[in-house]
């Protein structure tokens, strides 16, 4: 899906709660370096798996740097999911399905 961003010419805007243009952010990040691209694609795969598993409501990502947590938050926002930092560790992100959760077309 994220790779499709390179081919998408749609004018639909996706933003997170801070007003960040998610499509532009993903395009820039995917082009930045292979490590970031692989990280984003793994997050995307994990979230698609969560959407597809009807019996599962949330996923808890392992402890991560602030940058990687931001990648998780923005990808979860793109999927219409809730995303919060674990209050206990402050280094894990818990992503939960909502009524707005979907697998984006782009």
Image (cartoon, rainbow, N blue to C red):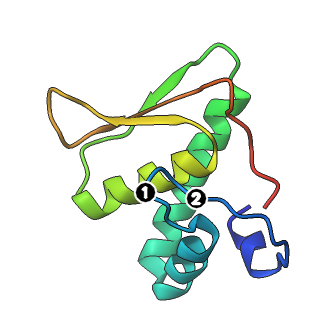
Which image quarter: residue 56?
top right
Q: Is residue 14 above or below residue 51?
A: below
- From the viewer's side, name the closer residue of 28 and 39: 28
The quadrant in which the N terminus is found is bottom right
Where does the image place residue 47, in percent across and percent down from the top left?
59, 42
The residue under the point 82% across, 55% down is 105
Mark 2 crowdedness (10 Å alpha carbons): few <14, some 14-19, many ≥20: some
Q: Name the disc covering residue 15, or none.
A: 2
Q: Is residue 98 above or below residue 65?
A: above
Which image quarter: residue 53?
top right
Query: At numbered mark 2, what does the secondary structure look like: helix, strand or loop?
Result: loop
Q: Residue furthest top?
A: 55
The residue under the point 27% across, 39% down is 92
Number of numbered discs overlaid on the protein picture: 2
Where does label 1 land, which residue? Answer: 18
Query: At numbered mark 1, what does the secondary structure look like: helix, strand or loop?
Result: loop
Where does the image place residue 37, in percent across and percent down from the top left?
52, 73
Q: Residue furthest front?
A: 19
The quadrant in which the C terminus is found is bottom right
Where does the image place residue 95, in percent across and percent down from the top left?
46, 34
The residue under the point 25% across, 31% down is 86
Where does the image place residue 77, in percent across and percent down from the top left?
54, 47
Which image quarter: residue 79?
top right
Q: Is residue 77 above or below residue 66?
A: above
Horizontally, is 28 left or right of 66 in the view?
right
The residue under the point 67% across, 33% down is 101
Mark 1 crowdedness (10 Å alpha carbons): few <14, some 14-19, many ≥20: few
Contact check, label 1 and label 2, Cβ < 8 Å: yes
Horizontally, is 59 left or right of 55 in the view?
left
């Amino acid at each position: 899906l994220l790779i499709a961003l390179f081919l998408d010419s749609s004018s639909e805007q996706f933003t997170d709660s801070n007003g960040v243009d998610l499509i532009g952010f993903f395009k820039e990040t995917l082009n930045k370096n292979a490590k970031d691209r692989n990280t984003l694609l793994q997050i995307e795969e994990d979230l698609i798996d969560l959407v597809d598993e009807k019996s599962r409501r949330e996923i808890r990502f392992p402890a991560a740097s602030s940058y990687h947590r931001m990648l998780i938050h923005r990808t979860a926002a793109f999927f219409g999911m809730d995303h919060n930092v674990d209050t206990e560790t402050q280094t894990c992100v818990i992503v939960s399905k909502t009524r707005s959760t979907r697998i984006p077309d782009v």
